[in-house]
Amino acid sequence: MSGGGSARLIRVHGWWILLVTVLVTAAAYAVGTTAPREFRAAAIVVVEPRVRANTTPVPPDMGTEKQLAQSGLVVDPAARRLGVDPGHLAGGLSVSVAPDADVLTFAYTDGDALTAQRRAQALAEAYVDYRNADDGPGGGPAPTQRATLVTDAALPGAPVRRPVTVDLGLGLLLGLLLGAGTALVRDRLSDRLRGRDDFARLLGGPVLAGVPRERRRRGEDPGRPVLLRAPHSPAAEAYRYLRSRLQPLLGDNTTVLVTSADGREGRTTAAANLATALAQSGRGVILVDADLCRPRVAAAFGLGDHPGLCDVLARDVPVGEALRHGPVPRLRLLTAGQRAPGAADLLGSARLPQVLRTLRGWCDVVVLDCSPVLAVSDAIVLAQLCDHVVLVGDLRRSTRGSVARAVAELSRGRLLGILLNAPRGRGAPAPRGDDPAPVPPGLPAVGSAPVAPTSPASAAPVPAAPVSATPVSPARASTLYGSAVSDNGRQPPP
């Protein structure tokens, strides 16, 4: 697995790997502390050359002596003396050689202290008897070595326990391996988006930006655009990055539809911040809440219950009277308005193309927030009327299957993508500081009362300082934040 894939696996399934590791480590600790008690008794034997007349003493080979002490030549006589099975007796025996000394230690481990003592003593005595015998096995020559039992096996007083650090280390290693392996399996079986590249492959088009997850302070309105409540945050910078990438694709009088595959994927958040960012760069923008099922634009900008798109499509209110001023200059809002019986069918009426043509004549960009593609058919209808379709994906909620089905439904549109809750540093250069900066002086508060036009002429923002109609470069876009500019002369007709 590549470095990026490993990082994504840890980011997405890190909690699972941690949980498995903790559980396995805890289980290893429990097994180590609750294991049956074992007692260890030991007897010590010294091996030395047998001295004979007219012979040269042969120094003992302690490696050979150790193998001999564990062989049937020693174990079988000890087993007959104890009345036990030789194989069972050999299971608890361990023989060690002292460094730089001709000393063997016969240790025996058993769950009973007296049994461990008796068997260690019997095995040591059987070895001494073999080495001190006058004749070898089968009446052969006597062994060249002799042995002396210097320390009898004592009754062990306390059980022998393995150090807990050993169990914890083994449990930690096994837990990490098991957690990583099962996380890899879960990732392969999961249908969630696997990152920006995965989203781009499903989309069949470019992903313009990745917006990092926001850290909201206590008391902040979560629906308010991040460009207004935290303009210096990484998320706000990501939307300015999105604006810079989208600017070359936007001509005059352009319509941009913002939608998502399913609900709760952040399409209203993306639409509100995109419209705000474009307005801050010097473009005239109208944000339309075309989600007639669950409208959210009015709440995001702190607007009350006013006539909107439903009223315009029902021919109850002229378009100019339904527009509201946004919280930044050059941004106007057309909310969903009063819900009425049959509102779900209004977007399919012949009135909608006329309204969009009118709005396009009054601004540079019309941004439409729409219902999810897989929930209702509104997005499919609007996609055929808009110049660009921006599909919003959420790395925490969007699934690959839902995105693929949404793309298939919107195949006629020019699809672009925005990935919300993307990892920091993926898709947008963002400052490292997370502290929200104060709103520049003179910017209207979102919660303030909107200025509702009393006549068609008053529906346009009040010009404060004339500026050139030349589009503002992305490098200077953020410097125009909060400045009052003219609307290039576009106003709702009388």
Image (cartoon, helix red, strand yellow):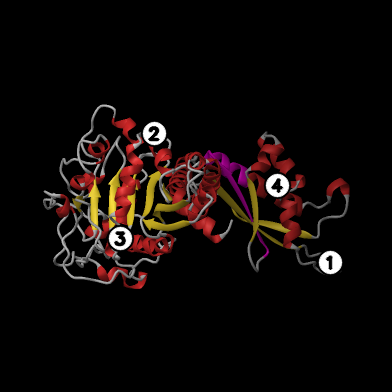
Q: Which residue is tagged 3? A: 277
Circle 4 or circle 3, nearest the eye: 3
Start and end of the magenta stretch? 102-121
Res 425 quadrant in image: bottom left
Q: Which of the two discs, 2 and 3, labels the residue nearer the N terminus?
A: 3
Circle 3 or circle 1, nearest the eye: 3
In 3D space, how far apart are the residues under numbered discs 4 and 1 (Cα atoms)? 26 Å
Q: Which amino acid type is marked by label 1?
A: Ala
Mark 2 and mark 1 in contact (Cβ < 8 Å)? no
**Residue placed most toward the observer, 439 or 245:** 245
- For the question of whether residue 162 can be seen, the reply is no
Res 277 quadrant in image: bottom left
Q: Which amino acid type is marked by label 4?
A: Ala
**Residue placed most toward the observer, 422 or 8:** 422
Any mark on residue 126, and which? 4
Any mark on residue 376, and which? 2
**Structural crowding at the residue carrying mark 1, measured as other residues with C-alpha within 10 Å and reported as few (<14), some (14–19) or many (≥20):** few
Res 89 quadrant in image: top right
Mark 1 and mark 4 in contact (Cβ < 8 Å)? no
Q: Position of residue 287 (x, y in %)?
A: 28, 50
72 to the left or right of 141:
left
Pick the quarter of the image with the N terminus: bottom right
Residue 429 vs 451, above or below: the answer is below
Residue 316 vs 284, above or below: the answer is above
Q: Which amino acid type is marked by label 3?
A: Ala
Q: Residue at the spot x=76%, y=58% of the render?
A: 64
Q: Which residue is tagged 1? A: 53
List the single residue furthest toward the front.
Answer: 494
Q: Which of the two discs, 2 and 4, labels the residue nearer the N terminus?
A: 4
Any mark on residue 86, and which? none
**Structural crowding at the residue carrying mark 4, measured as other residues with C-alpha within 10 Å and reported as few (<14), some (14–19) or many (≥20):** many
